[in-house]
Image (spheres, rainbow, N blue to C red):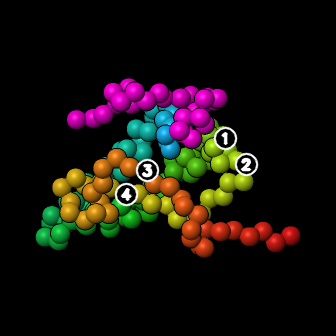
């Protein structure tokens, strides 16, 4: 069963919304509905699911156990090589949303991840309920210094 935002009383905001920041502060997340056009979303889904299904087929043929974490790494590697992937992180709407929440100093690191939530999996990394991921500021690896 798919849960819709409206089922749990969540508003979907336009990318230019002035009230989205307040919702982000209060809830820890916010939903936007017009960041990417439907054809982009459909294409991304097609790439991800086609890659996943190819990996499952290969594992079935070889008799190897399915490794969803390994699959996620392979899928994001494949996706990063597509032109449509580049359009995601250069989207002016996405950058505008991030700037409204994080401020103008935004950097992109070369470490993208895809997490596949597998409800039947026992691994606590792969089987999660709804939750929020947040940077705590505790890692020295994410502190940046500017030298002028």
Label 2 neighbour load within 10 Å: few <14, some 14-19, many 20+: few
Neighbor class of circle 4 (other Cα within 10 Å; few <14, some 14-19, many 20+) is: some
Q: Residue at x 13, y 70 (%)?
A: 63
Judged from the image, the secondary structure of the residue bearing numbered disc 3 is: loop
Image height of 57 relative to 32, above or below: below
Q: Quadrant of the C terminus?
A: bottom right
Q: Earlier in the sequence, mark 2 or mark 4?
A: 2
For image coordinates 57% across by 46% down, the residue present is 87
Q: Earlier in the sequence, mark 4 or mark 1?
A: 1
Report, in whole angstroms, how far the alpha carbon at label 3 lies from the one at label 4: 13 Å
Q: Is residue 84 above or below residue 121?
A: above
123 vs 35, nearest the viewer: 123
Residues at marks 1 and 2, CA–CA distance in whole angstroms: 8 Å
Are circles 1 and 2 on residues that touch, CB within 8 Å? no
Q: Residue 106 colored magenta?
A: no
Q: Please provide percent x and percent y for residue 109.
A: 59, 63
Residue 120 falls in image quadrant:
bottom left
Q: How far across and how far down the image is residue 7, in percent?
A: 33, 27
In the image, the segment drawn in magenta is 1-26
Depth order, front residue of 146/110 = 146
Q: Which residue is mark 3?
A: 132
Question: Marks 3 and 4: CB-CB under 8 Å?
Answer: no
The quarter of the image holding the N terminus is top left
User: Does dot 2 land on a helix, a strand or a loop?
Assistant: loop
> Is 24 displayed left or right of 1 in the figure?
right
Above or below — where is 68 with respect to 91?
Answer: below
Q: Which residue is mark 1?
A: 100
Which residue was labeled with disc 4?
A: 115
| Mark 2 lies on residue | 104
Task: Return the disc, 2 or 3, that comes first in the chain's sequence.
Answer: 2
Q: Nearer the viewer, residue 82 or 21?
A: 21
Q: CA distance from mark 4 to mark 1?
A: 26 Å
């Amino acid at each position: 069963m798919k849960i819709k935002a409206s089922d749990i009383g969540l508003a979907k905001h336009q990318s230019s919304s002035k009230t989205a920041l307040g919702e982000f502060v209060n809830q820890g997340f916010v939903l936007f509905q017009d960041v990417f056009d439907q054809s982009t979303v459909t294409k991304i889904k097609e790439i991800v699911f086609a890659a996943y299904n190819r990996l499952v087929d290969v594992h079935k043929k070889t008799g190897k156990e399915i490794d969803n974490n390994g699959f996620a790494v392979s899928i994001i590697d494949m996706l990063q090589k597509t032109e449509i992937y580049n359009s995601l992180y250069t989207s002016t709407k996405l950058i505008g949303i991030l700037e409204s929440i994080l401020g103008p100093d935004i950097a992109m690191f070369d470490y993208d991840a895809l997490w596949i939530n597998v409800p039947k999996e026992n691994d606590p990394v792969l089987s999660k309920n709804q939750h929020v991921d947040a940077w705590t500021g505790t890692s020295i690896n994410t502190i940046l210094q500017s030298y002028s």
